[in-house]
Image (spheres, rainbow, N blue to C red):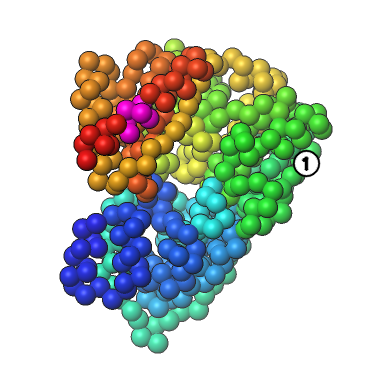
Amino acid sequence: MKYVVSHYLLGFPYPRFLTWVHVMSERLFGTNGFRGVVGKELTPEIAVKFGYAVGTHYLGKSVAVGWDGRLSSEMLSKALIAGLLSVASQVYEVGLTPIPALQKYVMENSEVEYGVMATASHNPPEYNGFKVIGPEGIEAHDSVEKRIEEIFLSGRYVLSTWREVKEVRHSEVLQHYLDSLLRQVDVDLLRRREKKVVVDPGHGVSALTIPHLLGRVGYKAMTINGDVDGRFPMRSPEPTPENLEVLSKSVSAVEADFGVAFDGDGDRVIFCDEEGKFWWGDASGIAISKYLSQRGICQAVVTPVTSSAAVEMVLRPLGIKVMRTQVGSRHVSYLMREIGSTWGFEENGGGIYAPHLLARDGGITTLLMAQLLAEEKKELSEVFGELPRLWQAKTKVKTRLEMRDKVVEALIEEHSDKRVETIDGAKIWFSDNEWVLVRPSGTEPLVRVFAESGNRDQATRLAREFKRRVVALTEDLA
Ligand code: MG
């Protein structure tokens, strides 16, 4: 909000955007980049100015621009590129790509110093946004986003003269990405254990890579929702149990060994076992942690506060250190880099394998799971069936932006007799496998409530109980 007030006083010349910032949040960027509804909060005009701001921050540096399969992505990317060219940036246009392929390209190509991806990941089709990728292929740090916001909102762009405008160069990244993924696994082993897999890219850009990737390791890949279509006609781009019913049925119907489903931009993957059962990313994250540890390449795992308590229950007895972060995959990436961890994951299916890329990649997570199954000669249901059975319930409460932190502080005070972690919001522990997390949303005027328990009904009850308490506190503290 402080930006809005100060720039209103300075006569900030874009009243339409001013209204948007006022309504949306006090920040341009949320937990996962800059997002909004196309045609309302996000227009080509805003994309051009975002290009000015990003290019001014990284002045004189070359940038790769990629986009996901949304109907608006090319339009917004071309506007962004116009803005970047206007501040004399050298632009490498990558075009339609999964986001990890762009990140890998930025990381490995010495001519390119950073990247921007037009994507709204798992959000509904009317949304879009931009993610800024730093030189190591990791999403830009909070301090970089703040600097870009300041330039955007102040309008202090460094516009170039006509002589300085550069030609756009075009780059193909998918082949290099596929080759680099295959260098991380034993392709001969995978080829010897031929599997049948159902792939559900959900009309997202994973359709460009994953069927080819599995084909190259000798798997029979049957694809559903495999056409890139920004309207997402057959399923929403978020890989949740409700959205993956067709995948589950397809896995059973064709007697596949497992199924994989991706979000819209391909950095998250969710697995279905051979019976078509959906498993959250905690399960695949823990299984891959154990596997990498047994191979001697994982001593410490990083995961956000929202992942299951099963992570510690399984990994600590094996001597694997577990480190928790706030929500947002880049926080996992940063902590992994700091402590030299090779593997990190999120419960939503984001897996990060540092020897490949210090960012989420649904492709590498799929290959690591395939290699685990091939080496251990197990079915996926056996691998996941060995894990403790915990249940999570999630809900949310609408609150005014300024109330969110007050509610969390009040809950910390109320539960001062219990173990309370404050990495992100308040995580209140009732036993080793039972907790409630109450955290303010990164972008929206709401508080999210997560509960976990060994008993399904108890998890639901806890989530409901804390939801009621958050509503009551919102009214009491107003
Ligand atoms: Mg994504």
**Is 226 on the left-hand or right-hand side of 67?**
right
Say whether residue 96 is magenta.
no
Q: Residue at x 59, y 47 (%)?
A: 237
What is the quadrant of residue 358 in the picture? top left
Q: Position of residue 438 (x, y in %)?
A: 34, 31
Q: Position of residue 327 (x, y in %)?
A: 38, 38
Task: Tell which residue pokes out farthest to the bottom in this image.
Answer: 162
Disc 1 residue type (three-letter)? Met
Q: Position of residue 7 (x, y in %)?
A: 22, 68
**Is 387 on the left-hand or right-hand side of 89?**
right
Along the viewing direction, whichever of 153 and 91 lies nearer the viewer = 153
Along the viewing direction, whichever of 315 and 131 lies nearer the viewer = 131
Q: The magenta stretch spans which residues?
A: 466-471
Q: How many marks?
A: 1
Q: Residue at x 24, y 26 (%)?
A: 412
Disc 1 target residue: 222
Say whether residue 470 is magenta.
yes
Q: Is mark 1 within 8 Å of ligand 1?
A: no
Rendered view: 473 above or below 403: above
What is the quadrant of residue 172 in the picture? bottom right
**Is 258 on the left-hand or right-hand side of 302?**
right
The 10 Å Cα crowd at callout 1, few under 14, some 14 to 19, many 20 or more, is some
Rendered view: 52 above or below 363: below
Q: Main secondary structure of the magenta part?
A: helix
Q: Position of residue 434 (x, y in %)?
A: 40, 17
Rendered view: 132 above or below 289: below
Element assignment for label 1: strand
Q: Residue at x 28, y 60 (%)?
A: 147
